[in-house]
Image (cartoon, helix red, strand yellow):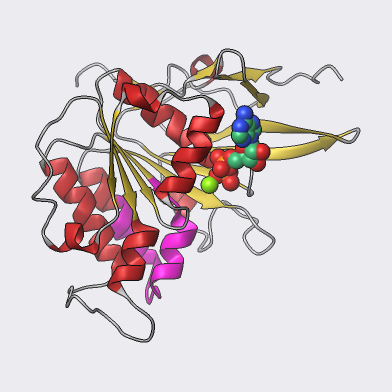
């Protein structure tokens, strides 16, 4: 076996806690409530890995690419340093992304599936373009094509919760298994976002996702004396000797970097 490659977390001090980083090829669940910066965390990893020579794909199902990019520009990312390609046309899905060049450097592709979805399924009318298979199939086929064109090493799926809204799972256990195996077989490192809510207080909706993924990062919003802080914890990371302590997760607006602080200790208040 070759030397284990790692994907960075791009959170200061957190790769040590991860035992080196996120092992390449892992499927990692990013679990947290709205506003915990799950999307930002994933974009941060993609952006920085793309600068290091990897190809990144961000699949956004509910947030438009415009809203996502606005947020990232507001955070201070210089998006002119990477080649951003937005896929928001149903025609892109149907024609198999033939207009994309293969193997472009510093490529960060955003699949705006919210916009594509509206074109695929106009009101009251199903499958206008005669696209066979369901919405999830078209997302997977785009990922597969991007991989074939050497435009995808790391994929972010934002979110699994939204995937569940696209399709009625008849046999969740085998369908979710298929979804994860599909990503694994392509050899991708995958970040799968899962929304924490009143109804979904476990790491997963069907109770099996957490067994099927290789890693789970939980991001929390915590109230302490009326101050709200973000916290991050590695709940699971296969093949690493990781530290399961809770860390304070801070965004440093000056350096434009995430920091993990006070692991296992009470933060100073
Ligand atoms: N400098 C900043 N600029 C913009 N938003 C910020 C900044 N720092 C923290 N945030 C917060 O980030 C949150 C949005 O992050 P996002 O990654 O979209 O969260 P999630 O995907 O978990 O819902 C907002 O609640 C916003 O207040
Ligand atoms: Mg989000």
Please tell me which residue is depicted at 21% across the width and 53% down the height of the picture: 142
Count of number-bearing discs: 0
As rendered, which of 194 and 244 lies closer to the eye? 194
- 78 to the left or right of 109: right
Q: Position of residue 262 (x, y in %)?
A: 71, 17
- 183 to the left or right of 266: left
Q: Position of residue 27 (x, y in %)?
A: 37, 41
Against 174, residue 51 (above or below) is: above
Considering the image in quadrants, where does the C terminus appear? top right
The region drawn magenta spans 157-180
Q: Is residue 234 magenta?
A: no
As rendered, which of 223 and 81 lies closer to the eye? 81
Q: Position of residue 241 (x, y in %)?
A: 48, 21
Against 116, residue 146 (above or below) is: above
Q: Quadrant of residue 249?
A: top right
Q: Is residue 232 visible?
A: no
Please tell me which residue is depicted at 31% across the width and 62% down the height of the picture: 116
Considering the image in quadrants, where does the N terminus appear? top left
Which SS type dominates the magenta stretch?
A: helix
Figure quadrant, ligand 1 = top right
Q: Is residue 166 magenta?
A: yes
As rendered, which of 45 and 68 lies closer to the eye? 68
As rendered, which of 47 and 217 lies closer to the eye? 47
Please tell me which residue is depicted at 32% across the width and 75% down the height of the picture: 121
Q: Position of residue 209 (x, y in %)?
A: 46, 54
Question: In the current view of this chain or complex, which residue is farthest to the right?
Answer: 225
Q: Is residue 39 visible?
A: yes
């Amino acid at each position: 076996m070759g030397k284990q490659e790692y994907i960075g977390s791009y959170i200061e001090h957190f790769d040590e806690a991860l035992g080196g980083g996120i092992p390449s090829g892992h499927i990692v669940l990013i679990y947290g409530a709205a506003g915990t910066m799950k999307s930002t965390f994933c974009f941060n990893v993609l952006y920085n890995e793309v600068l290091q020579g990897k190809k990144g794909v961000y699949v956004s199902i509910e947030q438009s690419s415009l809203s996502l990019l606005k947020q990232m520009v507001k955070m201070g990312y210089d998006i002119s340093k990477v080649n951003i390609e937005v896929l928001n046309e149903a025609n892109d899905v149907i024609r198999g992304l033939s207009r994309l060049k293969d193997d472009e450097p510093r490529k960060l592709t955003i699949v705006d599936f919210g916009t594509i979805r509206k074109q695929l399924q106009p009101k009251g009318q199903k499958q206008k373009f005669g696209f066979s298979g369901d919405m999830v199939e078209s997302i997977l086929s785009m990922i597969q094509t991007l991989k074939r064109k050497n435009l995808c090493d790391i994929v972010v799926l934002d979110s699994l919760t939204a995937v569940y809204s696209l399709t009625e799972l008849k046999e969740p256990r085998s369908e979710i298994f298929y979804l994860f195996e599909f990503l694994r077989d392509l050899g991708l490192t995958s970040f799968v976002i899962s929304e924490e809510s009143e109804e979904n207080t476990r790491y997963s909706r069907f109770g099996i996702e957490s067994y099927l993924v290789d890693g789970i990062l939980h991001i929390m919003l915590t109230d302490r004396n009326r101050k709200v802080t973000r916290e991050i914890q590695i709940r699971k990371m296969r093949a690493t000797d990781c530290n399961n302590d809770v860390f304070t997760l801070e965004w440093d607006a000056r350096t434009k970097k995430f920091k993990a602080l006070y692991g296992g200790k009470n933060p100073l208040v």
